[in-house]
Amino acid sequence: MNATFDFSGRSIFVTGASSGIGRATVEMLCASGADVVAAARNANELARLAEETGCEPLKLDVSDEAAIDEAFLSLGAFDGLVNCAGIALLERAVETTAASFDRVMAVNARGAALVAKHVARGMIDAKRAGSIVNVSSQAALVALDDHLSYSASKAALDAITRALCIELGPFGIRVNSVNPTVTLTPMAVQAWSDPVKREPALKAIPLGRFAEAVEVASVVAFLLSDAASMVSGVSLAVDGGFVAR
């Protein structure tokens, strides 16, 4: 499955770019003509991605505010942003610790907000209309066992999406979330390899399967594109119907 978009002449900043949905998004955007700055913590994977796609790699930890501030001192204005950096620390609610909760929030919610702040400032200063897409999760929309911190962070990200939507809309900047189900990154394939765990999850998805990273990337690209020119403030489930139950 490959969606076709034309992003020629557009510059897009992507976090969480070294693997999974972020990597698939960079691959799709570069193939569609975009100039992409691909940010992540894994310098080796970024170098490989840059060689394969022609993106500009940037080593960045979005949980580090000072590092974000420093990075944007030398970056120009962008036409789009994909906030894909994220972590999941799954634990029972009664075993949640402050350290794990804060770590997940720092990346999934605070980091996305701070990166969006800089990208939005650049768009406004350059008088560029643009699009911001936050990669959230179905865990923001429904309750899942062992997901308290992760669900809270993704629900916060959806709230950030709505807040940015109303503040940035007057500048022609659209802001949306995508909320995927389990997506078959290499890590997820391993995590869901146990049939006892996998089969009940698949039965809860009307389409009967998990998502592929490229399927989520296609929706991200749609929201970045002019085809979604009147779409803003949406949390769009990419989940095969899971949240419809």
Image: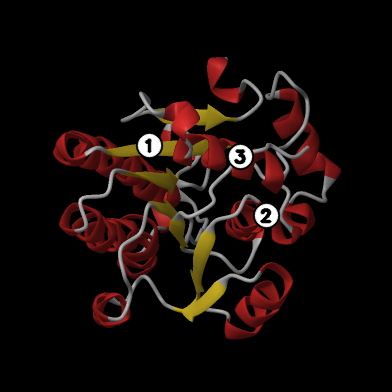
> Residue 15: x percent and y percent?
47, 63
Q: Residues within 10 Å of mark 2 (few under 14, many from 20)?
A: some
Amino acid, disc 3: Phe
Q: Which mark is residue 30?
A: none
Which residue lies under the disc numbered 3? 5
Mark 1 or mark 3, earlier in chain: 3
Amino acid, disc 2: Ala
Give the alpha-carbon distance from disc 1 to disc 3, as whole Å: 18 Å
Which residue lies under the disc numbered 2? 31
Q: Are marks 1 and 3 in contact (CB under 8 Å)?
A: no
Q: Residue furthest top?
A: 245
Left or right side of 32 for 192: right
> Residue 109: x percent and y percent?
32, 55
Give the alpha-carbon distance from disc 2 to disc 3, as whole Å: 9 Å
Q: Residues within 10 Å of mark 3 (few under 14, many from 20)?
A: some
**Total numbered labels placed on residues in the image:** 3
Mark 2 or mark 1, earlier in chain: 2
Quarter placement of the N terminus: top right
Q: Note whether residue 181 is visible.
A: no
> Residue 186: x percent and y percent?
75, 60
Q: Residues within 10 Å of mark 1 (few under 14, many from 20)?
A: many
Residue 125 higher or lower than 170, as above or below: below
Amino acid, disc 1: Asn
Residue 76 higher or lower than 171, as above or below: below
Which residue lies under the disc numbered 1? 176
